[in-house]
Amino acid sequence: MSAPTLDTVNRPAAWSVGEIRDLVRSEFRKTRSTSTWWALLIPAAVISLLLAWNSAKEGYLAANLAQALDFAILFATLFGALYATAEYRHNTIVTSYLNAARRPKLAVAQMILAALVGVVYGLVSVVAGFGGLLLSRTGFDGDLPWVLTVSAGSLPLFALWAVVGVGVGMLLRSQAVAVLAVLLYTMLIENVAVYLASDSPVLDKITDYLPRVATAYALSGFTGGEQFGGTFGVAHAWWLMLLVVAGYAAVAMLVGIAAARRRDLT
Amino acid sequence: MSIVEQQPTTALRSEPPSRSDDGRLVVRNLAKRFRSVEAVRDISFTAEPGQVTGFIGPNGAGKTTTLRSLLGLITPTGGTATVNGVPYRELVQPTRVVGAVLDSNGFHRSRKARAHLRIYTAAMGLPDRRADEVLELVGLARVANRKAGGFSLGMRQRLALATALLGDPQVLILDEPGSGLDPEGLAWLRGFLRRYVATGRTVLVSSHQLAEIAQTVDRVVIVSKGRQVFEGRMDELAGDNRDRVRVQCSDADRLAGLLARNGLREVTVLPENWLSIVGATVTQVGDLARTAEVSVYGMHREPADLERRFLQLTESEFLPEAPGGPPSDPPAQPVQPVQPAQSVPTTQEGDR
């Protein structure tokens, strides 16, 4: 029944740059043709502006900006989660997988797209944060170099957190559940964990490596030793904390891919 | 939404795709178990290029599970399902080989039809004009810039078909494409599928109604309760249940004798001078009655009751009483609109 010559034609598809580029272009069109990306970008910008403006009256500018961006990053994660789950919500996942029959390819394309959108969220939040700082101060004074360092350093964090959102979305599939999970974790669970662990010196050290804490440490590192939020110093090198966050993004993607890989779409 | 206007067929290649592979779908001993539920078991069939293969069974018979296994969306727990000899997931550029219409809800509601299609032209590395070509092909060109959320069920079916056609695939797999189409749309779809296989391509189409696709398909695979109960040509499905002519005349025995001498031996004499003749035409019987000098009081053709055969095969709970005996009210014999006689030429054409 099977013609032997076909085997050469239908070799299992290898990964090619061109193919991933096409898929990223497709993901870009998916994103652009819906409203999620700007609907979440607006609150990210507004919060950056307000937080930077409000806190700039006291303290150091770089630290204030870092604190504002730390909060704005949450919206990049929410974007990633909503973007990945929209495929299930609108049933487009079937068409996507028919095309990217090797499912991890689609996941990689979505990861790249989310990282790019994350950088856009970062840039817009930074600009809004600058606006907030300038609304309360007339100039950056001597803080400008650190303000710029925080701005640049926040961009990879925005990208990584958007990727975390994609991984969570791929795993959970439901928009409501994914959003709830992200919010519960960032606003509640991690804070409670840090609080409970603070009595034990050993546990306290370990909680430094929780995703949100590590992010705060990384941002803190970019301020050159200024503190924000009262708790964070430069106990850890920024690059180490950046690597920790990158590790979480990688784990989120791997878990998401593992869940999606052989999942039956009935 | 008028779609009967001349459809430009230029967007379909007129010659078979220039690939070295054949476009054959092969399902062998396919089984799928979802936790404790056995969805399908031991399904085996082949869909050949140049033919429309119908995949028929009641709702819940395992049609969708089988089709989705062929498309790599479901991982079978047993057996194989291949396209061109390999599992779907191993195809290079699968959407250039297989197009699939699975459900009519695979659209983001706020996305315009053209924007929806351009997502996939990008993914497949096709030029963007291909999106407009397929919209034209399915008769949606005028609503290209309308949001899919506002589409009727019929329009969504067409958009799903347009999506499947983007890659100009060699194989087309359609899951219940008829649902939601009005009679006009259904007629258009039948014509479209016939034209599609006429270029040497493969079509596999599922339906829960035999009548809906009996006129369109060359071969049928019938499934029921997750098992395959029939695979073969449409005329094989009819089996001994062939077309008959029923005639009431002044002397049934005399006519039966003449019919037998003219090669029509499968004649049943029924009460009240009714005859049931297998494999005859009304003209034949009418002419012979004249020769036999018997008066004809009534005569009608009785198409092979495929629907009944289908219900028997699928062990339907709704199987009607067998119409074995003579019709007590002769001309009122209910005839299902299956019209298998019209499917016969199609079958022969397809079989070559």
Image: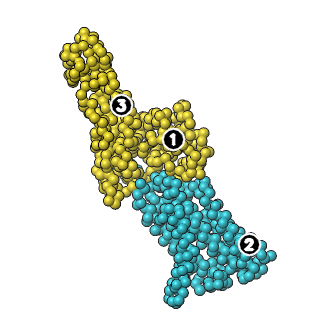
Q: Which residue is mark 2?
A: A132
Is there a contact, CB below 8 Å, between mark 3 and mark 2? no
Q: Colour of chain B?
A: yellow
Q: Is residue B200 left or right of residue A52?
A: left
Q: Quadrant of the N terminus of chain A?
A: top left
Q: What chain does mark 3 sit on? A: B
**Mark 1: which amino acid?**
Gly
Local crowd size for mark 3, using a 10 Å CA cut-off: few (<14), some (14–19), many (≥20): some
Q: Nearer the viewer, mark 3 or mark 2?
A: 3
Label 2 residue SS: helix
Seen from the viewer's position, the closer of residues B189 and B249 is B249
Residue A204 at x, y = what percent? 53, 86
Q: What chain does mark 1 sit on? A: B
Seen from the viewer's position, the closer of residues B334 and B210 is B334
Residue B5 at x, y = what percent? 55, 31
Position above or below: B257 against A33: above
Q: Nearer the viewer, mark 1 or mark 2?
A: 1
Seen from the viewer's position, the closer of residues B38 and B162 is B38
Q: Residue at x 59, y 54 (%)?
A: A29
Q: What chain does mark 2 sit on? A: A
Q: Nearer the viewer, mark 1 or mark 3?
A: 3
Spot the residue most to the front.
Answer: B328
Q: Colour of chain A?
A: cyan
**Mark 3: which amino acid?**
Gln
Which coloring applies here? by chain
Label 3 residue SS: loop
CA distance separating discs 1 and 3: 25 Å
Q: Which residue is mark 1?
A: B154
Q: Is residue B120 left or right of residue B292?
A: right
Q: Is residue B343 visible?
A: no
Label 1 residue SS: helix
